[in-house]
Image: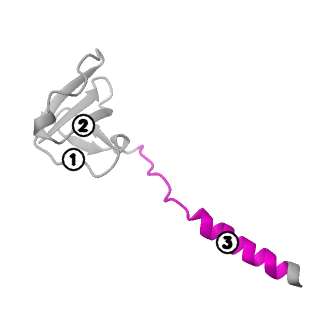
């Protein structure tokens, strides 16, 4: 079970809760939004990765997943090593 809050006009998901003991705690005071309960698992992505189409969650075609985090420390060490080699020449 999944409790879902979404924007009525667009279907954009603005919150969800997958813990039945916590159902009812999503903020219901937003006039442009509604809360529904679905027979569904918690989505694997972020709120922006899905829409509510009135009966179920569907993938958001405009969603662009974030780029994977880069290991900046390793990149800096690699550049330092290259710089050391250039300075020794």
Labelled pair 2, 1 in contact (Cβ < 8 Å):
yes
Crowding at dot 3, Cα within 10 Å, few <14 / some 14-19 / many 20+, comes out as few
Task: Please determine whether, in this image, residue 42 is positioned above or below residue 22.
Answer: below
* Magenta residues, start to end: 62-86
The CA distance from mark 1 to mark 3 is: 39 Å
Residue 9 position within the rendered picture, expressed as x and y whole percent measured from the top left: 31, 23
The CA distance from mark 2 to mark 1 is: 8 Å
Task: Please determine whether, in this image, residue 47 is positioned above or below residue 34.
Answer: below
Quick check: 83 left or right of 21? right
- The residue tagged 3 is 77
Residue 16's label in the rendered image is 2
- Between 72 and 28, the one lying in front of the other is 72
Between circles 1 and 3, the one closer to the viewer is 3
- The residue tagged 1 is 42
Q: Does the segment drawn in magenta span residue 44? A: no
Residue 29, by quadrant, is: top left
Residue 61, by quadrant, is: top left
Between discs 2 and 3, the one toward the N terminus: 2
Q: For the residue labelled by badge 1, is the local secondary structure a helix, a strand or a loop?
A: loop
Q: Residue furthest right?
A: 89
Q: Residue furthest bottom?
A: 89
Report the residue at 49% width, 59% height from top: 68
């Amino acid at each position: 079970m999944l409790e879902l809050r979404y924007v009525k006009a667009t279907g954009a998901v603005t919150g969800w809760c997958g813990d039945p003991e916590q159902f009812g705690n999503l903020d219901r005071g937003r006039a442009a939004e509604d809360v529904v309960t679905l027979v569904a698992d918690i989505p694997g992505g972020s709120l922006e990765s899905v829409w509510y189409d009135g009966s179920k969650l569907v993938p958001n075609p405009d969603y662009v997943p974030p780029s994977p985090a880069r290991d900046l420390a390793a990149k800096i060490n690699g550049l330092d090593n290259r710089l050391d080699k250039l300075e020794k020449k």
